[in-house]
Structures are given as structure tokens and as C-alpha cells.
Amino acid sequence: MNMFKRFFLSRNTIISLIISALFAITLAAFIPQGFLASSDTMLAWQAAHPFLERCSKLLGLHHIYTHPLFSMILAGVTVSLALSAWNQCLAAWRRTFHPDDGIAGGERFVVPGTMKDSWLILAANGYLRQGTSNGSMRLVRHPWGYWGNTLLHVGIVVTIGASLFIALTQQRGIIQLAEGAVHNPSDPMLMEEHGFLVKPLVLPDTIRLDRVTYSFWPSNGIRQIESQLSFLSDTGTIETKNVEINSILHHRGIRFYQGVEFGHAFFVEVTGQNGLNRIFQLQIQHPEAPDRPSYNDFQDLLGDGYLVRAKYLVDAEKKSFRHVNPLLTLRLDKQGKELGQIPLRVGEEGAIGPYSFRLKAVTPWSRLIIVDLTGMPGIFLGFFIICLGGLLHYFTPPRELSLHATTGGDTAVCWRAAKFSGFYQDELASLKTALGYEEIHG
Amino acid sequence: MDNQVAIYVALNWLAVFCYVGATIANVGGVMFRKEVVEQRSYWPAWLGLTAHSVAIAYWWSIVGHGPYMAPSEVLSSDAWITMVVFFIFLRFFPRIKAASVIVFPVTFLMIALANFYNPGIRALPPTFGSVWLVLHIAFYKIALGTLVIALAFSVFYLLKNRRAALAWMERLPDLAGIDLYAYRFTGFGFIFWAIGMLAGSIWAYKSWGRFWGWDPVETWSLITWLLFGTYLHLRRFFRLNGNRAAWLFILCFIMSLVSLFVTSHMGSSIHAEYFK
């Protein structure tokens, strides 16, 4: 056990762990990570860096954060921090409640008056009495400063622990619904991810998006988005709740966040070859300005190598977002060649190549982020402990002082700052003045 | 609107001129050992800070959000906080006074640079309306201000430790003292950086349910924090000091500038919103 502790508390281990974590994260910042980069980005990177790509595949550099080596580094950091925090906790306890006799390496000087006189002056300057032994009185200013480093390290341990717990147990998903649309618990989500220790997220109820409302700043930036949701339970009850950005909706232990993505969904009836007659829903992100369209491509909509490219303006006259009169333009490509395009308003129809399109309806859609996780209070607690520890460690290092009566009836003082002594020389000078040191040597 | 922009720009330029005056008087006073001149250099600095504060408050009242959206707002508030942080620390640690020869010019350079950007009104994205965002940004700015003071002492160390040290360097604390101040203020910066990073993660959780997303700015911020952690541990456990510590700090400082100003331009980051 002692060898284990010695290993994790050795300065070489600590610095190696920090540098290893630093190196791994820096590497991950330069090499695209599988869970972050799109497949297009990944392919482009692979084409541009064939040698690095071979190395990445061999060493698993495209998934550094889930690599066993990174897990080992993280575990090592956590163990080292935890052991260090424990040792520091013991040291802080000893310094606070069972301090050593005398003060080693402090600055010594003699002041006139009795120990009690000096004590009263020191008490007025924030020094607290810690005890008396062998005729010497020990005082300390900011004794809580002994706990700063302990708390700082405990806070980091708590934060890492809570983060790991969340990473292993979280469930999250994203859905995009058009007004009036329903998402059943068994329906696939737009995106789903979950920790190693849990199953994929399953919604407890069917969700219906009743209404999307949004407002804009005068500069056309989005100001707020709000979705009204109805939760339809198996028992037939309906609960209606609202969610907006920065106002989370809680439903049966699951948190719903309003995403910043929203726009219009176009219901287009397509008639074409092989007796195709179907209504497709084309969701396109809201444009950034009334005079600029927004775009989306739909690769697998029609099959047979056809690519449907869509763009739309909220207001066909390009004047304002307040006037919703959408103009959808559809373009059909095949093998990189444009076959034609048609502008459509609600009720209008047109044909491109073998297909005819009819815009039947338009309605807003919005994105909802659904999260089920526990452990955030651990992050908050870690945050609070780190702040407290950092403030105590860096802003209130303890200043220790001992008083001892001299044979001449004066008082011998020994002072030192537990850390960064050179930083508190001005404080020592003013303390000497307060204790009357200048008068003796004046 | 044009009048409002003109007033804001004029106030900013007034602050720049005051800071330039303060810098010339301060650097001259320190280098030529004119204590009265050095002392009085604080008058234009305070005047500049007053004009600067009025400019920020005035623009805040016009745009309706804090100074963290447009590049001009970001740089101006960075300059303001750097100056304020210096004055606050100076109140508690008078021996850091000499750091003014770096802090004053850094301040005026930042606000002057801010003036070259168009101070247009940027709409606040809806996720930016959280108090945690304000704390997140404020603590990063405070960390920058603190690190500028540490930079000053690291530079002082390198200058004073040369064979032919400049004469005015004699007025600075001894080498051990300078080294200690650099170490100490890096510690302050490290803790403010950590608080800023954690406040950001809480803001992200409140806004979109994810407290850490490996966004480029988040990642580089963590790398910078770990680099500062390495610096602090090397100093504590391996007694790293002197020139090597000063150079390592300068590397960390450059990294912090990259994290704060360069990575924000990465298009895939939520932070790109605030530096577009």
C-alpha cells in the first residue's frame, strides 16, 4: 500500500500524468475525433494526410477520449489527486488543530510590552490564538488557508468523478418535429447517444409538437424560440408544457431543452416514375436574413441517384421575417448535373424531369434536445469546492506567529507566512509598527 | 445611431489618449527614476479608466447586453478589466507597482485595437442570456488581467537577469522577489481560468444540456489550463525557477492568448458567435 501511495504521490508520477493528459488532449485537438467530426471532414482529412491516417488507424488516434490509454491516464490522475488530497487533508488537520511547537524559519524580533498586550494588538489584526505550549503562545491569521490546497484538489477529484459518472450513465437524444407532428417512444431519434452502463434513451410518452413560436431582434438575429409540447401517455392523459431556450422542461425525470435550430417544414407531394405518389417532409433551417435563402440537400429522397436540393425564403418578397409567405425552390440533380428547378408556393406545382412536385403545406419545425442524466450536482459541488479551495489557497495563506516572554519583560515575536513569505513583507512591516517595534529601534 | 457610435468611439479614443499619456509618463518615470512623474502617471490612467468605464456603460445601455459580443466590445472590456485588476491588486500588493510598465501599454494597445473594429450592434443569441455566461466570460477576462501582471514579472526577470541589466531595473524587487511575483500571479490566473472554465460548463449545461462538448475553444482552454498546471507543479515539485520558469510562463501566456482570441474564430465553435 505504501509503495502504491509513494508511486502515485511521487513528483515524477504527478508531472508525467499531467503532461500525458496534456499531450493526449492536444493530439485530439489536431486529429479529427470520430464522435465529433462529420464523415465528410474525416474523409477529407484522411485524403490530405495519408501517413497520419495510417498512424491514427494503428494507434486509435481517432478516438483518443475512449482509448484505453487515455482512460488509464485519467484514472491515474484521479488516484494521484485523491491520494494527494487525502495527505493534504491530514496535514491541514494537523496544522489547524495540532500545530508544531515554535515556528521554523520565521522572522524574529522583540517588541515592548507583555505577551497579553501583543496578543490584544494581534487579535485586532485578525490573528487567532491556536494554543500555548512551553510558555509560548501560537497565533495564526487565516487558519482556513491551510485547507485551500486540500479543497482545490478535492474539488478537482469530485469534478472528474462526477464527469466520469455522467459520461458512463447519461442518455441523450435529439428530435426535430414539425408543428402537429408526433414522436412515439419507439420512433428513431435524429441523434442518440448513451453511456457504457446504460441502454439507449426511450421516451416515457408520445410527444406532439403543438406550436413553435419565435421572435427576432431588429437585426434579424433570433431572440427566443419556444415550443409547446403535449405528452400523450398510454392511459390517455395529455399534459401540455412549454420549453424555451434557457428554460428547461422537466417531464417524468427527463429534461427537455429547446435547441437553437428551427425553420420551416415543407410538405411536398411527389409524383413520378414507377407509380410514385408520396408526401415528403423537407425540413430546412430558418434563413439568417429575409433576403437570403436557406438551403438543404436531400440525398436519398427519390433514389436512383437523384439529389433533391432545396432552398427557401421566409418571405417571397424578401422584406421581413414577420411576413411568413415562404417561397420554396426545388432543384433536381443527377450525377452532378442539374436537371432543372422550380419555385413553389403553397398550393403550386411543377415538374422537373420525370417528377412532378406539389407544395401542399408549410409549417414550422423545431429541434428538441432530450437528456436523462444524474450527477450534475457533483459537477456543481466540485465547482464550488474548487472555487473555495482556490480562493483560500491563493488569497488567504496562513500567517503564523508565536509570542514568547523575554527575561527583560518584553515579548519575542516570530512571524512567517505559510506560503509566499516574500509577498507579505508589507504586512509584516505594518505589524511591526502596530506592535511598537519601531519605537524600540527608532 | 450614428451619433451614438460617434460618442462611443470618441470616449474610447479619449481613453486611449489618456492611457498613452499614462504609459509615456509611467515608463519615463520608471526608467529615468523620476518618482514624481511615475506617481503622476496614475492621474491620466485613472482619467482614462473613467472615460473607458463611461464608454462601456454607455454602449451597454445602447446595445442591451454586456461587452462580449462584437470584437470591439470584447477587446475593450479585456483592456478595462486588465486595468481594474491591476489597480485592485496594487491596493493589496503595492510592490507590484512596477508591473504598470507592461500593464498600461497592454491596456492601451487592446483598446486601440478595439477601435479599429466596427462597433456595430450584435444581437444577443438566445443561449447567451444566462448569468453563468456572464460569470464565464468575466472570469476569463480577470484571468487575462492577472496573467498580464505575471507576464510583466516574467519579462522583468529575463531583463534583470542579463549580464548588462538596464539601470532602471535596480528599482525593481530583487530577482527572487520578481520570480515569486510571477509564480504567485500565475497561480491567481490559474484559479480564475479554472473558475471561468467551470462556469462555462454550467452555462452550457443550462443552455443545451451538455456541460462539456469538446468544442475547439473548450479543448484549447483545457489545454491552456493543464499547461499552467504543469508550470505550477514544475515550480512546486521540481523547484523550476529563474530564466527557465520565465520562458515557460511566456509560452503559457502565448497559449492563453491563442485560447482566448484565436480559437474563437473556429467556425465549428459556439464561441465563434461572439467573435464574428
Image (tube, coloured by chain):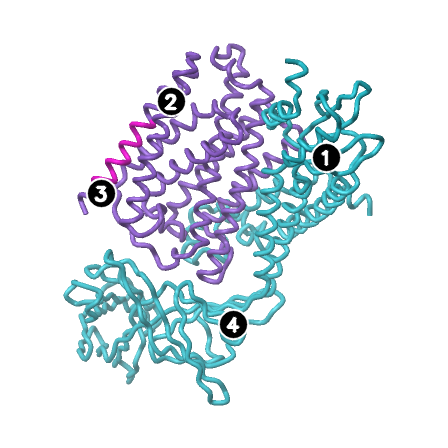
Chain colours: A cyan, B purple
Find the distance from the CA under tag 3 to the CA under tag 1.
58 Å
Q: Which residue is mark 3?
A: B5
Q: Are marks 4 and 1 on the same chain?
A: yes
Please provide the residue range marked out in magenta: B4-19
**What chain does badge 2 belong to?**
B
Q: Which residue is mark 1?
A: A139
The answer to whether residue B241 is seen in the rendering is no
Labels 3, 2: front one: 2
Labels 4, 1: front one: 1
Q: Position of residue A139 (x, y in %)?
A: 72, 34
The answer to whether residue A233 is seen in the rendering is yes
Q: Which residue is mark 4?
A: A254
Labels 3, 4: front one: 3
Q: Which residue is mark 2?
A: B41
- The circle on residue A22 is none
Count the labels in the image: 4
Q: Earlier in the sequence, mark 4 or mark 1?
A: 1
Q: SS of the residue at dot 4?
A: strand
